[in-house]
Structures are given as structure tokens and as C-alpha cells.
Image: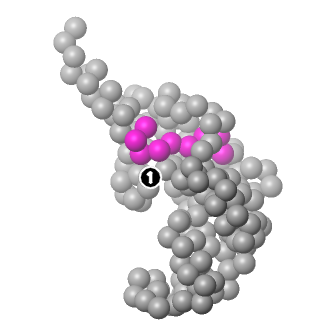
């Protein structure tokens, strides 16, 4: 499992996440998400397609709740600073988590590196970037789990 790399797991250019430029208006994201029901992640890129952040669905839902005029019980699970950020947000980058860009893995990372990152950061999808930080693919938890099980199974087989 240590020797298997991300490059062996993912297919470049097979992005299933929604990729947005950081200046995208939040209203436009909602339209995209409603029309593309099979999207599972939201990645933000700069003008050169380098990953700069990821957007958490939770943040987007909290923002939508505020837009509907309801702040009821939001204070019980987000901080005052997060609430202020949600109230003032107009563009997608304003909702992105500050550590969102640190969720990425590279093509040379090992399967074990990916698992550790996903577990530590509670991720279900990770962006895959090249050496220049450009987004090339994404990996879902079930793909990582399947690869782990295959690697474990093949290492236990008797030759």
C-alpha cells in the first residue's frame, strides 16, 4: 500500500467536482449545483487553474440559510467570526475554508498519504494537483477504500 501512488489510482482530467474560479458569485454556484446533482466537491482555482481552496458543503448550506432570512440556531454550531464571514460573503472564495487548499494530494503521494489526509481532515473527496498546483483530478473515499482493500488482499495472497 505504501508503494501505490495517486497517479496509479486516478485518471487525469476526470474531475467530478465542480471547479470554479474564485471570483464566482455565490448565486451562480447555487444554479450550477441545482443543475448538476451528481457533483460532490467544490474546488476553487485561480486564473492559471491552480487549486487555491475547497468549499465545504456545510458552509454553503449555512450561507443559504442566512440568505433565506433564518439565523436560528446557526450560532450553536459556528463561531461568531464564521457567521460574520457568511453574512458578508458574495463571492465563492469568501466562503472557502482557510485551510481548504491544504486538502490536495499530488500524483506522487502514496495511498497511505491520501488515507491519512482524508481521515485527519474528515474528507470524502480530495483534489489531485500536479507539481505546479494545477488541478488534474479528484479522488473519492470509496476509490481509496477499494484500492486499499485490493492492495491488502494482494499482499496476503500466497504465491
Residue 28 coordinates in the image, percent (x, y): 74, 66
Furthest residue in direction right, as rendered? 47
Which quadrant would residue 64 be assigned to in this image? bottom right
**Residue 34 in the image: above or below residue 48:** below
Which residue corresponds to the image point at 54% horizontal and 73% vertical from the top-left? Answer: 61
Query: Would residue 2 be seen by someone viewing this image from the given angle?
Result: no
Which residue corresponds to the image point at 63% horizontal and 33% vertical from the top-left? Answer: 12
The residue beneath circle 1 is: 124
Query: Would residue 66 be seen by someone viewing this image from the given angle?
Result: yes
Residue 30 coordinates in the image, percent (x, y): 66, 67
Residue 23 coordinates in the image, percent (x, y): 77, 67
Residue at disc 1, secondary structure: loop
Residue 141 magenta: yes
**Residue 118 in the image: above or below residue 146:** below
Which residue corresponds to the image point at 39% horizontal and 59% vertical from the top-left? Answer: 122
Magenta highlight: main SS: strand
**CA neighbours of label 1 inside 10 A, class few (<14), some (14 to 19), many (20+):** some
Magenta part of the chain: 135-143
Residue 104 magenta: no
Which residue corresponds to the image point at 38% horizontal and 32% vertical from the top-left? Answer: 147
Amino acid at each position: 500500500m505504501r508503494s501505490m501512488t495517486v497517479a496509479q489510482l486516478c485518471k487525469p482530467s476526470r474531475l467530478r467536482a465542480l471547479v470554479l474560479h474564485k471570483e464566482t458569485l455565490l448565486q451562480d454556484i447555487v444554479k450550477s449545483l441545482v443543475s448538476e446533482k451528481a457533483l460532490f466537491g467544490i474546488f476553487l482555482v485561480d486564473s492559471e487553474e491552480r487549486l487555491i481552496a475547497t468549499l465545504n458543503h456545510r458552509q454553503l448550506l449555512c450561507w443559504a440559510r442566512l440568505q433565506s432570512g433564518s439565523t436560528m440556531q446557526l450560532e450553536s454550531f459556528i463561531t461568531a467570526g464564521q457567521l460574520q464571514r457568511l453574512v458578508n460573503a458574495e463571492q465563492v472564495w469568501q466562503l472557502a475554508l482557510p485551510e481548504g487548499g491544504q486538502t490536495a494530494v499530488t500524483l506522487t503521494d502514496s495511498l497511505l498519504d491520501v488515507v491519512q489526509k482524508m481521515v485527519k481532515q474528515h474528507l470524502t473527496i480530495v483534489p489531485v494537483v500536479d507539481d505546479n498546483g494545477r488541478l488534474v483530478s479528484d479522488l473519492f473515499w470509496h476509490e481509496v477504500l477499494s484500492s486499499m482493500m485490493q492492495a491488502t488482499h494482494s499482499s496476503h495472497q500466497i504465491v
